[in-house]
Every structure is written in C-alpha cells, then in structure tokens.
Image (tube, rainbow, N blue to C red):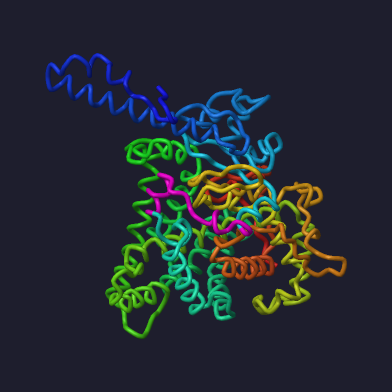
Amino acid sequence: MEGTGGELDYTPLLNWPPLAGGLPDCTSWLLGAMLFLAGYLLLQHLWNFHRAVSRNVPPGPRPWPILGNFLFLLLPGLVGKGSSLESRRRTFLFPHIVLNDLAQIYGNVFSLFIGSRLLVILSNFETVKEALVTHADVFSDRPNLAMVIHVTQQKGIVFAPYGSVWRQQRKFSHSALRHFGLGQLSLEAKVIEEFKYVKEEMLKHGRGSVNPFPIISNAVSNIICSISFGKRFDYEDKEFKTTLKLMSRGLELGMNSCAILINLCSWLYYLPVGPFKELGHAITEIRSFLKRIIAEHKDTLTAGNPRDFIDMYLLHVEDEKAMNKSSFNDEYLLYIISDLFVAGTDTTTNTILWSLLYMSLYPDVQEKVQAEIDAVIGRDRPPSLTDKALMPFTEATIMEVQRMTTVVPLSVPHMASETTVFQGYTIPKGSVIIPNLWSVHRDPKIWENPDDFYPDRFLDGTGHILKKEAFIPFGIGRRVCMGEQLAKMELFLMFANLLQSFTFALSDETSKPSLKGRFGLTLAPFPFNVNISSR
C-alpha cells in the first residue's frame, strides 16, 4: 500500500467490488462510501502509528497497532517476564509503581503508546528537572487528550495550554489569591476559625472510632471556599457534602482505565452506562454547583468592593470588555474556580489524611511532634505560622509524609509543543510527558532506605530543616502548583492544631490499611478509622 516518496497508494481499495463496476443503488453507494472512509481512516492511523514507532523514540514495551500498549493492562506477557493476573491488577491500581518497575527495565526515559499517542515517562529527578526546567520552552504545554478536553475544555489554570492566555490567567489568579490572604498571615485566621469546627466534630465522637475523611475534607474545602466564594459551608450541608463526594470519585475515575479508554475512543464519554456515566454525572453536578455560586455573585456584585476571588474576577471581566480579544470571561472563570475548588480541596485533604494515618502507625513520631508543639506553643493558644521556624521536627514530619505518599504521583501530564531531541531520543510534537514524582521520591540513589518512614532525613546535624532539591511534591518548572504556598500554610496549621488537641490511634476493629493508597489524579489513603483522645 506504500507508493513512492513514502506516500500511501489507495488503488487496491478503489478496486474493491462495492466501489468498482458502478453503483447499482443508493444503499450500495452509501455502504461503499462508509467502508471506503473506514478503510481510509484505518490506513491513515496505521501509517501514523508506523511513523511514530519507527522514529528514534525512547525504548519501551512493544506497542500493538490501534491500541498501543493498552493491552498490557488486559493480557499477560505484554510487559515483561513475570506478568500475571496480580501484575495486571497492580497496573490498574498502582500505575505509578508499575511505571517505576518498567523504568528498571527500559531506563529513566522510556515510552508507552495509548493508541498512536506517544507517552514519555520520566523516572528520576535529574531527568524530570532537565525536561521541565532546562527544556521548559518545549515541555510546559498540556496534552489535548480527549479526556482533558471533555473535563476542562482546556481552560483554567491546571490543564490550559501553555501560552499568553494561560500566563494572563495565572498572573491574575495568583494576584487575586494574594489579595485575599495567600502567603500572608491574614489567612491564618481563616484556618484557625475552621479548626474550631473540626475540633467540635471530632469531640462529638468522644474516644470512639471515627472516619476522619469527611471532617478533614469539609474543613480544607471551606478554607479555599472562604477565599474563592467568600463563604464557608456547614458540615451538614447536603449539597456541599454531595459535591465533595462527587469530586473525590470523579478524580479517581479520571485517571484509571476509564480515562484511557476515553482517550482511545472519545465517544465513550457519552456512553450512558457504567463508569463513563458516573464520571459524566460527577462533572455535570460539580459544574452546576459552581455555576450557581457564580450566578449568586453576579446578582450581588458591587463595583469597587470585591468580597472574594469570584467578585474580583467578575469586576476584571467588566474592565476588560473594552478589549476586543480579552481572554477574561464568565466561562473561563468557571474553569478557574473548578481548579481552585477541586485541586485546592483534594490534594491538601489527602495529605492531612495521610498524616493522621502515619501518626497512628508511628506513635513515637506523633509523641515527638506533640512534645515540640508543647515546648514551642503550649496548649493554651492556637499555632501560628510564626511558630513554624521553631518547629523543625514537625515540619520534617509533614515533608516525610509528602515524600512517602506523593499525592499527585504522576504529576499533571505535560506535552511536547514541538519535536525535539531529549537525552538522545526524538520526542515528537504532541507527545505526552509523564513525570513520575513517586519514582523521584523513592529513588534509593537520593533517599536512603526510601520505603522507610523517617522524618529525620529532612534534618541536618544541628536539627535544622535540610532542604533537598529532589523533594518536589508540588512539581517543578513553569507549571509548578499555583497553590503551593496555600497548601504549605494549611498543612502546617491544620497538622499542628490537630496534634496539639488530639492523639490519634488506629481503631481496634481496623486492621492496618495498605499504604499504597487509592490511585486517581491524586493518591488517597484507603478508608480508615481512628480513635481520638483529647490532650
């Protein structure tokens, strides 16, 4: 089928009987046209696939036509030796770990294919840094995958393409968040106020068993809501509780095999059955919740008096209306608010939950943190950010939890904006770049006994915080998490408040949960219950 100059020759297809010898009727003509189109698209796909795999791309498991490497999730023997039912189960549940295992076979830069789309996996710190910092001009874009388009329309801050619009939106958003307390002591009061509700909820259970997830999720979300929406929600608010559950489930569905299938066949997103229906429902309901909040703000907006992020953005939209091509509009606001609400809730919630789980599993570390809290703060006043510099072991414990769990283990996917050569390999334009941050944080060449929970690894010989360049829980480069400062503030204040007030232990009826976590866009702990004792 290949003609001169690498072009495809479709002559054999044109001589196929339904298209040769005339068109006897409309039905035959339509059938022939459809078959011709299907054949043309198939051949085009195979040709594109052949060109992709024949280039000097990074090594990896051999892909199959059309499906690429997706079959290694379904059939044994396609990844390497020892592939089994258990290994396939691990691929579904723990892809970050499986990708780390593949790096031991193929190297720190290797490739997979989803259909004909090339994925390049980066598996150690130097490689991730070189790609996202040294080659930031090429690797700062976001992929135009079907799943990303369905969920975000490539708008907002997290998944928007790299370029002038993204820079304008990020610059404004960061400035607006700072106006309402990001990185400043004024935000401290919001966290302390919210902790009063956390403490009240936990005290309701006395010394009994409690699932901390809904309490922590409500609290963390309310902090970002106070900045974004200018309000907090009661923990029993039915709509708020439902939205948080939908968000958690949507993030889990959005990064499993369901997402891979949608990227292979985008029409599956609209399938009214199974996980596809569930994912679509979650996205629709969350958007409806946020649209109602934006509509309420528009009805009560007062010029010159912004109450929160939404007000400030809406006022900026009015100021920009005189410009013909302004990127600021109500639709873009919806997606930015979605980013703030979803990312600002889920990542910090899971980090705090992991912290409580690790404190329950390592009571000696918990006691040492509490001793530092008692020595620096005491028990009569709430923790302040000004205490942080005097509490290195508490900070080191939080950092070690972040290293061990890496709540965004595969980062947010990047994309090559142009064809380039990276570490001797050709990376075609449009390739998806996956930095495996979990691998970076478990690299034995950087972290001694990386699978051990050991906060002292972040302390130097004098007991001060030891900064490590390879510690990158918020990513690295131009697309580093915009909410990093907010997350660090929340983590320290909430963690210190919790351990100042309570001691946590796993419930007697709860066996030790797996520390591998539940993989979605974020890595969440499996459900666990704790017994809470007031101090």
Give the extent of the magenta segment. Answer: 133-153
Q: Is residue 20 above or below residue 225?
A: above
| Left or right of residue 115: residue 110 | right
Q: Which is more toward the observer, 263 or 378?
A: 263
Q: Is residue 352 visible?
A: no
Q: Please name the residue shown 62% across and 24% down the image.
A: 84
Asked if residue 176 is positioned above or below residue 466 in the image, the reply reads below
Residue ranking furthest to the left: 25
- Which residue is found at the position 43% from the left and 51% from the top? 246
Considering every residue shown, the one lying at the far right of the view is: 461
Rendering quarter of residue 374: bottom right
- The image shows residue 293 at horizontal and vertical percentages of 34, 67
Relative placement, left or right, of 245 versus 324 is: right
Q: Quadrant of the N terminus?
A: top left
When asked about the image quadrant of residue 464, the answer is bottom right
The answer to whether residue 244 shows anywhere in this view is: yes
Looking at the rendered structure, the number of numbered marks drawn on it comes to: 0
Main SS of the magenta part reads helix
Give coordinates of residue 201: x percent, y percent.
Answer: 54, 64
- Residue 525 location, x and y as percent? 60, 49
Reply yes or no: does residue 495 show up in magenta: no
Residue 144 on the magenta span = yes
Of 71 and 487, nearer the camera is 71
Q: Nearer the viewer, residue 334 or 358?
A: 334
Where is residue 49? Give x, y as percent.
47, 32
Image quarter hosting the C terminus? bottom right
33, 522: nearer the viewer: 33
Residue placed farthest to the front in the image?
4
Residue in the picture at 34% in, 38% down: 267
The residue sitting at 39% across, 50% down in the picture is 151
**Picture quadrant where residue 277 is located:** top left
